[in-house]
Structure formats: structure tokens, C-alpha cells
Image (spheres, rainbow, N blue to C red):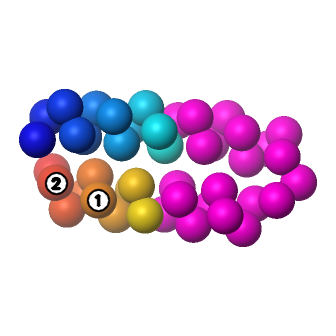
Amino acid sequence: MIRVVYSLRRFRLNTFDVTPTQPTPFPTRNVCYISHFSIDNFI
């Protein structure tokens, strides 16, 4: 469980880093929201 949360956090950070540079915030934003929700549910 902890490992999953860690990977999700890492993924969220990556998506946030990519969001400003990429001109397509729709899919990245979706992923960010999904990962955020899963982290909230896990914790």
C-alpha cells in the first residue's frame, strides 16, 4: 500500500511538472485528479 502511494505521488509530481510545459492540460489534469483522489482514499 505504501509503495503504491509513493508511486502515485511520484506520478502526480511528474504530471504536474509536465502540465505547464505541455499545451494539452486535459489528459494530464485528468491523471492528476485521479492520482490525487486515490492518494486521499489510500490515506
Q: Position of residue 31 (x, y in %)?
A: 53, 59
Q: Is residue 32 above or below residue 26?
A: above
Q: Position of residue 23 (x, y in %)?
A: 88, 54
Kind of residue at badge 2: Phe
On the image, the x and y values in percent for residue 5 come to 24, 40
Q: How many numbered dots are placed on residues in this image?
A: 2
**Element marked by disc 2:** helix
Residue at 33 percent across and 34 percent down: it is: 7
Q: Secondary structure at mark 1?
A: helix
**Residue holding disc 1:** 38
Asked if residue 28 is among those painted magenta in the image, a careful observer would answer yes
38 w.r.t. 17: above or below: below
In which quadrant of the rendered view does residue 21 lie? Answer: top right
Which residue is drawn at the image coordinates 34% and 63% (left, top)? 37
The range drawn in magenta is 13-33
Residue wearing tag 2: 42
- Above or below for 33 versus 18: below
The extreme left residue here reads 1
Q: Which mark is residue 1?
A: none
Whether tag 2 and tag 1 are in contact, CB under 8 A, the answer is: yes
Which residue is rendered at x = 47% and y = 39% of the image? 11
Q: Principal SS element in the magenta part? A: helix
Classify residue 13 as left or right of residue 36.
Answer: right
Q: Is residue 24 left or right of residue 32?
A: right
Split into 4 quadrants, where in the image is the N terminus?
top left
Crowd class of label 2 (few under 14; some 14 to 19; many from 20; radius 10 Å): few
Mark 1 residue crowding within 10 angstroms, few (<14) / some (14–19) / many (20+): some
Magenta segment: does it hold 31? yes
Give the Cα distance between marks 2 and 1: 6 Å
Q: Amino acid at mark 1?
A: Ser
Tell me where residue 42 appears, x and y as whole percent.
16, 54
Q: Above or below — where is 19 with respect to 17?
A: below
